[in-house]
Amino acid sequence: MPETPPAPRRELRVLETLGMSVAMMSPVLSMALFGGAPAVFVGRAAPLAYVFAGIGVILVAGGIIFLSRYFASAGSLYGLVGASVGPRAGFFTGWALLGPYLIWTASSSVLAGFFATRFCQDSGIWPEADYLPFALVCAVLILLLSTRDVRVLGRVLLSVEGLSVAVMIVVLVIIVSKLAGGFEGRTISHEVFELPQGATLQLLVLGSVFGFQAFAGFEGAASLGEETVNPRRNVPRAIAMAVGATVVLYLFTSSVMAMAFGTTDAQGKAFAESSGPLFDLSMTYVSPAAAMVLELGCVFSAFSAALGTMSGASRMIYALARDARPSSRFARLGNRGEPVTATLFVFVLALVLIIGVRLGGIDGLHVAFYFGSIGGLLLLVAYVMANAAAIRMAIATGGRARVVAVTSALGIGMVLYLIYNTVYPAPKAPYNLFPYIAAAWLSIGLVIVLARPDIARRIGAGMTTNAAMQAAGDATPDDTARRDHHGDDATVHQT
């Protein structure tokens, strides 16, 4: 009889778990590529848009943090929603979340290759460099790290993204020091938090919608729920710390960028039209060498993002397989408790996508934009499902928890508004096709969950059998007050 594979090991502390959320958000990459997006709508007041976006993400994160105080699962939002509402809702949520994790592993690897290529070209090391070999090397490296000890994974994620953030902060501090001395008539100014003439509240909200996208992936720590010590305390803390720190970082970064470009309408327009505001400002305020160092920082940031999404996707596949069909190859763990088969699947799919987009002649930057748009829509649907589950859970729990029902409802409103503005009015081609691709992926999940009720039953039984999400011995302040209640086709189980 074959030896039973080991269960996931609880070895991660809060900082190591934090690394997953930080890596998935990849703040340096987000700011380097999309930091000026809100300026398209409100010019110099882009930082004000990040204030609104920060409020929105705090509302959405609040519901997920609330659920993670009760449940811990390798399936991230799949486990949280499945345990609190039922297996059908959980499977659909997991399916929605799996889509972006799978394609973002490939697109982040491509982005790492893109910035490595850009560095080689700008430095003259390899003027004819192509992103494909760098992207393939990135994919191989993240595969090797993903099959190592989970503690190594957590430390690498936090260290690599931390190094990238440190590079960005150094550049920003130099810019601030020059602004303080009055650089070419530009200075530190509170005007970046004031709407310019002609900008309306509606435009500000629309700009904040694009700022919200920079926070995508904050829920990443939830996928380490079965590998974190005291997960119902440390996972919520990790998510809260990631969101809080990133809100502050984005406000600081966007404020410095807005002031560095200048506060006049023409300067605000230049901010909006910049395809890489951090690189442009590094060239202007520091030196071309600083811009190249920042390019290396983006390589590290993209690498950590790819590592994070590969780890998240493999754990999602493992959790789904374990609950639905424990005998599946995807439900097997390696000697260190890592989902080896699921990780290999994600790796092979990433290779196919990386080579496919290169053969299709799509440049690295557009790969990120295209896959980011598709994955972003799927992720938002998962956020809606998670916050709907939080509302139900909060109402059932009662007491002060009912506040979460209100904040989660507001968060759902923010996300639905974001989805609406993403699909209407229809964007230019090929972006107008991406909502249909996302809808097709969601439809497949919906058909599975409706046409195969046996899968939902097996998942429900699997959730119960797996020791109430593997969280025995952990407690939350509301445990004694919480009542058992029933989901759509499964009893809710406390972890």
Image (spheres, rainbow, N blue to C red):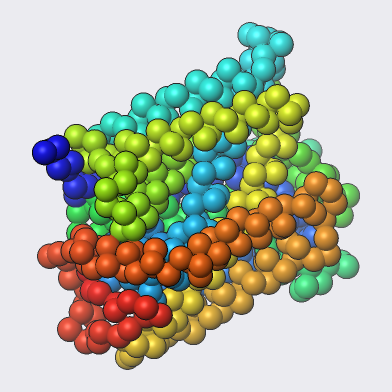
> Which percent across, then down, holds residue 485?
30, 85
Please, is residue 88 above or below residue 281 in the view? below
Q: Is residue 87 left or right of residue 126?
A: left
State which quarter of the image contains the C terminus. bottom left
- For the question of whether residue 391 can be seen, the reply is yes
Q: Is residue 153 left or right of residue 312?
A: left
State which quarter of the image contains the N terminus. top left
Q: Residue 330: name its quadrant.
A: top left
Residue closest to the eye, 263 or 47: 47
Find the residue positioned furthest to the bottom.
Answer: 399
> Which percent across, then down, holds residue 492?
29, 77
Q: Residue at x 80, y 54 (%)?
A: 432
Q: Is residue 94 left or right of residue 48?
A: left
Q: Is residue 127 left or right of residue 376?
A: right
> Which percent across, then down, holds residue 200?
81, 72
Residue closest to the eye, 323 or 57: 323
Please, is residue 320 above or below residue 387 in the view? above
Please, is residue 124 above or below residue 215 in the view? above
Q: Residue at x 65, y 29 (%)?
A: 356
Residue closest to the eye, 410 or 149: 149
